[in-house]
Amino acid sequence: MRADKPPHLEEAPAPDEEEILTPEQLAEVWAAEAPEPAGPVANLLSSLVALGLGLAGMLLSLKLGLGTPAEPRPGMWPFIVSLVVAVLSVVQVVIGRTGGKDGEKFSSYSWYAAIGFATLIGMVLLMPVVGFEIPSLLLCFIWMRWLGGERWRSATMYSILIVAAFYAIFIAALGTTIPRLF
């Protein structure tokens, strides 16, 4: 395996024509290569962390104001999303505690989610200061290059195209009031 690409992006060798697997055989191969299950304690703890994030999101969005369905305020959609996260977390705590078959143990790649979340928070903090273009470009580039394993050239090109598309949709077409440089 190459050290610069996450395992989900490694290119598997093409099977010979004689080695084509049936769906059952393929499921057996995947089960044999699967990481160890996390177990009920890890499932409970991860559900409680998600519940905490959902409750925090609900409290923060209440501070923004919810408004009404006819005239929503800035906190309406963050509140709805946070509510869904909290409800699903409670369901996972109640029903999914016996898990262990579906959840995976944490590995070095588990940090990718924390890095993604931290860079997203960084983008939110930078947007009011320098606009959305630079933080969005940096976020896309970091996610594609280091979290996604893209090459420098493609990560740069895709990041520019994505930010340009968001600019065209949300600023040029919809006329939203996102903080921006241009």
Image: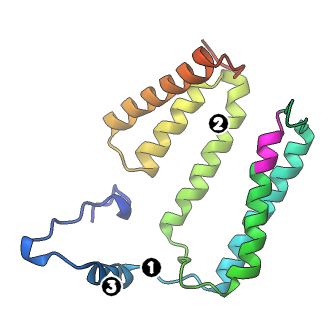
Residue 22 pos. (x, y %): 23, 79
Identify the residue position indicated by label 3 in the image. 28
Q: Of discs 1 and 3, which sits in the foreground?
A: 3
Residue at disc 1, secondary structure? loop
Q: Vertical placement of 68 versus 170: above or below?
A: below
> In the image, what residue type sits under mark 3?
Glu
Q: Which residue is mark 1?
A: 35
- Membership of 79 in magenta stretch: yes
**To which quarter of the image does residue 45 belong?**
bottom right
Considering only vertical position in the picture, is 179 above or below 7?
Answer: above
The overriding secondary structure of the stretch rendered in magenta is helix
Q: Which residue is mark 2?
A: 123
Residue located 44% across and 79% down the image: 35
Judge whether 158 appears above or below 175 on screen: below
Which structural element holds mark 2?
helix
Q: Secondary structure at mark 3?
A: helix
Counting residues from the N terminus, which is met first, the one under dot 1 or under dot 2?
A: 1
Estimate the x, y position of residue 105 in percent, counting from the top left.
Answer: 54, 78
119 sits left or right of 124 in the view: left
- Where is residue 66 shown, x and y percent of the image? 89, 39
> Residues under labels 1 and 2: Cα distance?
32 Å
Which is more toward the observer, 118 or 69?
A: 69
- Neighbourhood count class around disc 2 (C-alpha, 10 Å): few under 14, some 14–19, many 20 upward: many
Question: What segment is highlighted magenta in the picture?
Answer: 74-80
Question: Which amino acid lies under the numbered mark 2 shown in the image of this protein?
Answer: Met
